[in-house]
Amino acid sequence: MTALQRFTGRTVILTGAASGIGQATVVRLVAEGATVIGVDTNETGLCETVTRANAGAGAGGSARYLSGSVAEESTAQRVVADVLATEGKLDVLVNLAGILRSEATTSTTLELFRQLLDVNLVGTFLFCREALPALVATRGNIVNAASTSSLFGHPYMAAYAASKGGVFALTRTLAWEYLKQGVRVNAVAPGGIATPMTAAQGESMGRLDLSLFGHLSRPDGVFGKPEHVAGVVAMLASDDGAHMTGEVVKIDGGVHN
């Protein structure tokens, strides 16, 4: 774990905090001194995240959580209001909440397509919209979760790729819209990262087409770790990323070079 303390005195809202990349990023930011409020529907996972993060907290760092679905407008409103009331400010918003489903396009139901859009894209939009006034006040920043599927063709991911493509476009638009107000907006685009979410899709991916793995993992079959993404998120959200906005940083082990 890094000994950096780039987030001392800074308040962060992070969605998708219960597992995988979200959990690793909470642990990383708290280790660097941040006060992180994690958001997710999985309270068991949130408790685990908070315990892990607080056990390795840096000077001034701490974690707590608020449960709720990012796809619901009331959740974004409630979380931002709570953080402003208890912490007095907001410095960083990290939107990592997401769901992944692999399905042939002709078998993708309208319900499934909308579900992925609601969580991955609408949820990101809602938290950005609610947080932006507070971030303008602190000249803070946003880090969103896009995906290599938003940049390259990934078979059997039409709904997921469409939702992440929307996050890509939203990130670029907000970066320009809020440039003069001092709010930076960037995104990470992970490829194959070993998380509970990707593991759950392994069987269906193999059932559909083994060539899909060629779009996610390196030729040696190695997937990235959540901590690899967490480190990049921390850089973008810190002063080390002060001259970066509108960027979508690919984290895929070189698969798409």
Image: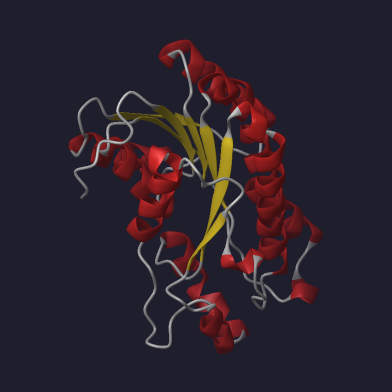
Q: Position of residue 210 (x, y in %)?
A: 55, 88
Residue 160 drawn above or below residue 13: below
Q: Quadrant of residue 54?
A: top left
**Relative to 109, is 39 on the left or the right?**
left
The residue lying at 31 percent from left, 36 percent from top is: 6
Q: Does 184 sit left or right of 175 as displayed?
A: left
Quick one: 200 or 120, which is closer to the camera?
A: 120
Vertical relation: 174 (above or below) 210: above
Tell me how many marks there are.
0
Indicate whether 143 appears above or below 92.
below
Percent across and percent down for residue 127 are 61, 33
Residue at position x 48%, y 11% in the image:
85
Q: Nearer the viewer, residue 117 or 115?
A: 117
Q: Residue 163 at what x, y percent from top left?
A: 69, 56
Colour scheme in use: secondary structure
Depth check, front residue: 144 or 8: 8
Residue 104 location (% of width, % of height): 72, 76
Instruction: Compare residues 251 and 214 and report the one nearer the observer.
Output: 251
Looking at the image, which residue is at 70% across and 59% down? 165
